[in-house]
Image (tube, rainbow, N blue to C red):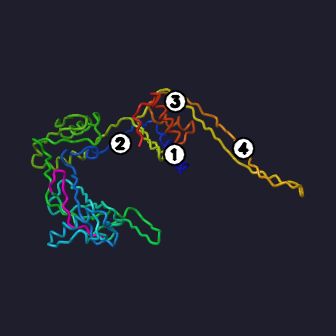
């Protein structure tokens, strides 16, 4: 696995090192890919319900709130059952979650996710009973119900069991009906606000410039994360068309210099604007090999002695010659890549080298560990 990662990283480094102008090349994208209109967002919904029809894989009688929920549900149908008589092995208490998109209307359907709360072994084959879904303000915005779709299973018997994926969670595509919509206000006194996904002063300025090249002086940056756009009078009755035209405008976003490191997998991703000061790097390895051999001492015949086995331990220490290289002050990521390749660094060693260079103050970037 490590060898594969090393080969992939080396190939990427070689490809990067062949592009001396990499630091000056930036990808152009659409405004809709780096910013969104404020007020247009999803809303989270949550509800508590019961899944019925399980084949003995539901909650045990130790989960008292499941029994209480069954009793309360049956009361709404005029059925009074003592809780002591209930064995809820075919029923499971669940939490139901959903995302309510912007601009949905009553009668639309949305997907829901159902997750077990108790000690149910599996929700396979179950049906969610009608469950109201509430927002943070406590109001009901949708109602969910329907048969479960579980992408896994759990089976066992005779002291052995087998499980695939997570059988205690599933989904119901289109399982909730929207009962009320969320008011979305896009136009505020003739203006709209664009919220940047990654707040950056340079990117905000470039968005303003892109809009002004197309529509004139109608945009201004409020801060690093917000651009305010005045709706032209010609688009007064076609706000949707105006927003669509803005979203399709090309813009070149700017990002801070960053190196992202995943120590678990040995992955290193470096941005094109990472620079370093002059620094010397030495890389080498120390290998210690310990081996054991067994010798048998056999006494002569009729000597009365006994056979004795002895263990011998051999220790071998090999130190590979360390490569010392000076990394000059540079403004190109290709120089960094070439330098790390020159010392024969593996992905794990690249991580250590970058952390050491950052600690020395010679690496000018945001070093992020994930």
Task: Check the picture and name the quadrant holding the C terminus.
Answer: top left
Residue labelled with disc 4: 314
CB contact under 8 Å: marks 4 and 2: no
CB contact under 8 Å: marks 2 and 1: no
328 to 270, vertically: above or below: above
Of residue 308 and residue 128, the one placed in the foreground of this image is: 308
Q: Is residue 346 left or right of residue 45?
A: right
Q: Residues within 10 Å of mark 2 (few under 14, many from 20)?
A: few
Question: Residue at position x 70%, y 42% from top?
Answer: 315
In the rendered structure, which disc, 1 or 4, sits on the residue that comes first in sequence? 1
Q: Nearer the viewer, mark 4 or mark 3?
A: 4
Rounded to the nearest angstrom, the CA distance separating label 1 from label 4 is 39 Å
Rounded to the nearest angstrom, the CA distance separating label 2 from label 1 is 22 Å
In the rendered structure, which disc, 2 or 1, sits on the residue that comes first in sequence? 1
As for residue 131 lying within the magenta part, the answer is yes
Of helix, strand and loop, which one carries label 3?
strand
Residue labelled with disc 2: 27
In the rendered structure, which disc, 2 or 3, sits on the residue that comes first in sequence? 2
Rounded to the nearest angstrom, the CA distance separating label 1 from label 3 is 21 Å
Question: Residue at position x 51%, y 35% from top?
Answer: 353
For residue 74, the mark is: none
Q: Is residue 267 left or right of residue 124?
A: right
Q: Nearer the viewer, mark 2 or mark 1?
A: 1
53 to 198, vertically: above or below: below
Q: Residues within 10 Å of mark 1 (few under 14, many from 20)?
A: few
Q: Residues within 10 Å of mark 4 (few under 14, many from 20)?
A: few
Of residue 101 and residue 76, the one placed in the foreground of this image is: 76
Residue labelled with disc 3: 327
Q: Nearer the viewer, mark 1 or mark 4?
A: 4
Residue labelled with disc 1: 11
């Amino acid at each position: 696995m490590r060898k594969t990662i090393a080969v992939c990283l080396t190939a990427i480094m070689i490809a990067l090192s062949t592009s001396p102008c990499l630091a000056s090349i930036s990808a152009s994208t659409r405004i809709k890919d780096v910013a969104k209109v404020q007020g247009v967002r999803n809303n989270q919904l949550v509800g508590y319900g019961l899944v019925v029809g399980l084949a003995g894989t539901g909650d045990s009688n130790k989960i008292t709130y499941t029994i209480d929920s069954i009793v309360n549900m049956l009361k709404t149908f005029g059925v009074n059952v003592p809780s002591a008589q209930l064995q809820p092995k075919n029923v499971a208490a669940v939490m139901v979650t959903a995302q309510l998109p912007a601009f949905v209307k009553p009668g639309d359907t949305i997907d829901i996710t159902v997750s077990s709360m108790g000690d149910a072994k599996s929700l396979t084959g179950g049906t969610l009973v009608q469950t109201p879904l509430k927002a943070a303000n406590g109001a009901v915005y949708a109602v969910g119900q329907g048969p479960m779709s579980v992408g896994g299973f759990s089976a066992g018997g005779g002291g052995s069991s087998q499980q695939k994926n997570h059988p205690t969670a599933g989904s119901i595509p289109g399982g909730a009906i929207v009962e009320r919509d969320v008011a979305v206000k896009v136009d505020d006194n003739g203006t709209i606000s664009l919220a940047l996904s990654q707040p950056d002063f340079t990117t905000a300025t470039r968005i303003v410039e892109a809009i002004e090249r197309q529509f004139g002086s109608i945009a201004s940056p409020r801060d690093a994360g917000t651009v305010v756009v005045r709706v032209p009078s010609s688009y007064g009755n076609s706000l949707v068309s105006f927003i669509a035209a803005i979203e399709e405008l090309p813009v070149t976003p700017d990002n801070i210099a960053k190196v992202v490191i995943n120590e678990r997998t040995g992955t290193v991703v470096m941005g094109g604007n990472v620079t370093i000061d002059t620094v010397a790097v030495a890389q080498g390895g120390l290998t210690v090999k310990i081996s054991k051999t067994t010798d048998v001492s056999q006494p002569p015949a009729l000597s009365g002695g006994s056979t004795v086995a002895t263990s011998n331990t051999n220790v071998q220490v090999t130190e590979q010659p360390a490569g010392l290289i000076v990394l000059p002050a540079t403004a190109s990521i290709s120089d960094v890549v070439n330098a790390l390749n020159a010392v024969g660094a593996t992905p794990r060693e690249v991580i250590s080298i970058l952390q050491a260079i950052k600690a020395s103050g010679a690496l000018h970037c945001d070093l992020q560990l994930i």
